[in-house]
Image (tube, helix red, strand yellow):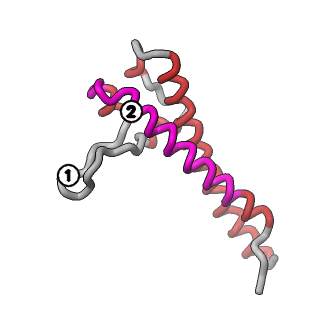
Amino acid sequence: MHQIPTSVFLLAMAVTVFFWAHLAFALLVRFAVRRDQRVVKALFASDSSPGLMPFKSFQMRVKLFLPWASACEMKGHSRSVKVLLWSARLAGTGLIVAFLLVVGDCIYLASSGA
């Protein structure tokens, strides 16, 4: 039986950490801006149709993971909410990058015969 290479294991752990960090920060942002429907619609993916899911969407729009995308809807909100939003954005970006690195590392290891 083969062992999992250390690089794949560490990158998979990074994916897990970024996933849970993004989830926690996105939920905190959603809770903090729950009364401002304009901001909720701008930051979060559209809610599913009634009956499919009993709760509102907490998934942020993917465009916000790009550092050059503006979240101008946050004007007027407190600094702590803006920090939570940026933390969620950075964790989402880290999640995507770490996942792509895992896939790339697996392809490299498979092609090199390791």
At mark 1, the secondary structure is loop
Main secondary structure of the magenta stretch: helix
Q: Identify the residue under disc 1.
A: 49
Q: Position of residue 4 (x, y in %)?
A: 75, 73
Depth check: give the residue in front, 17 or 74: 17
Q: Residue at x 51, y 42 (%)?
A: 24
| Mark 1 vs mark 2, CA separation in Å | 20 Å
Q: Which mark is residue 81?
A: none
Q: Quadrant of the C terminus?
A: bottom right
Total numbered circles: 2
Q: Which residues are magenta?
A: 11-38
> Is residue 81 part of the magenta span, yes or no?
no
Q: Position of residue 62 (x, y in %)?
A: 45, 43
Q: Residue at x 34, y 43 (%)?
A: 45
Q: Position of residue 51 (x, y in %)?
A: 18, 56
Vertical side of 38 occupied by 11: above or below: below
Q: Residue furthest top?
A: 76
At mark 2, the secondary structure is helix
User: What amino acid is labelled 2 in the image?
Assistant: Phe
Q: Identify the residue under disc 2.
A: 31
**Corner quadrant of residue 56:** top left
Depth check: give the residue in front, 59 or 99: 59
Vertical side of 49 occupied by 80: above or below: above
Badge 2: how crowded within 10 Å, few (<14), some, or many (20+)? few
Vertical side of 28 occupied by 7: above or below: below
Q: Residue at x 73, y 64 (%)?
A: 8
Depth check: give the residue in front, 24 or 110: 24
Q: Position of residue 108 (x, y in %)?
A: 74, 68
Q: Residue at x 42, y 41 (%)?
A: 60
Depth check: give the residue in front, 10 or 104: 10
